[in-house]
Image (cartoon, rainbow, N blue to C red):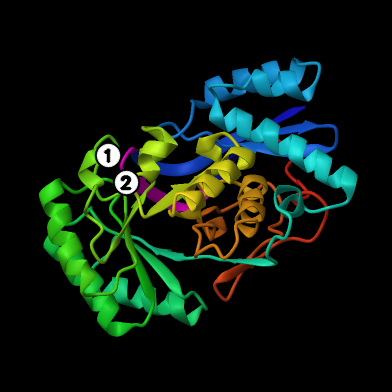
Amino acid sequence: MIRAFSLALDAPLPTANGTIDHRSGFLFERDGGVGEATPLPGWTESREDCGAALREADAADDWDAALAACEGSPAARHAVSLARLDAESRARGITLAARLADDPAGSVPVNATVGDAGVEATVEAVENALDAGFETVKVKVGARSLADDLERMRAASDATDATLRADANGAWSREQAREAFDALAGLGVEYVEQPLAADDLTGHRGLGDGVGVALDEATTNHALDDVLAVADCVVLKPMALGGVDRARDAALAAREAGVEPVVTTTIDAAVARTAAVHLAAGVPEISACGLATADLLAEDVADDPAPVESGRIRVPDAPGHGVEVSVDA
């Protein structure tokens, strides 16, 4: 069965590809399992193509055929593969985390995210995140001049003891990135996420001298092995990768290559967001992940079984992913 949904954001979210004011997608249900497809053009297929793939999957005779119908449509495959894993986990009476890993953690550290703002507002937002229990804060940069962003990062570093990350969303040139990395190295910034455009993989090589290079958008433009050869960290979005199973494989490959995986969402609804928590719990000693995104939505498809508490998200202990869908779309 397929059910469509559309969820308003709490506030419009500006991105490099335009402003997002809602997230729409589909719930895919089969054999007692529930998966979610929330496509995001630029990262995944379109909503129309996602729906078409899911309809083919829904008509398939078995799980293998359903998955085959979604090849080339990562959001659709995410929904079908998650529904299968959820159904199998519920049938065995185990959590999705236990289905994905032998000894999953009971909770996952997460980072807070601070959007573009002036110096004082940025410092205040970072301080508020620390007061709420977050130890790691990601600051959005790239919308302002480099000088302004460096001033924001410097002020946040001087005012707090938070572990800081910066996310440039590919906004900088190679020259700007080199200047930024030189300046940020003295501030103890953990890493810069996607400093250069996603198609400029070569330009990222050698940037990380004291500050890590985390690649995000580049994962959809290049083969994973090529990304791992350049990055210090890799940001894994299960929806864009085609499922938590494929994201799990990517996380293990990253660890094998000496690259730190960070699991995050594409502003997903409760089913996919919670599944990503289960995934992160199965990666030993994972660093803070970008999973504290529930408050970006004004509404959701279910009550959140995995809220953020003092900078961590506890893994639901119910069988499967633990989300009981309430939406009647």
The answer to whether residue 27 of the structure is visible from this angle is: no
The answer to whether residue 249 of the structure is visible from this angle is: yes
Check the image and report above or below for 201 versus 3.
below
- Kindly identify the residue that appears in the image at 18 percent across and 56 percent down: 144
Pointer 2 and pointer 1: residues touching (CB < 8 Å)?
yes
Assess whether residue 13 is covered by the magenta stretch: yes
Residue that carries the numbered disc 1 in the rendered image: 201
Residue 182 location, quadrant: bottom left
Check the image and report above or below for 164 versus 318.
below
Residue span colored magenta: 9-17
Q: Quarter holding the N terminus? A: top right
Of the residues shown, which amino acid type is indicated by label 1?
Leu
Give the mark toward the camera: 2 or 1. Answer: 2
Give the SS element for disc 1.
loop
How crowded pointer 2 is (Cα within 10 Å; few <14, some 14-19, many 20+) is rated as many
The label shown at residue 230 is 2
Assess whether residue 299 is covered by the magenta stretch: no
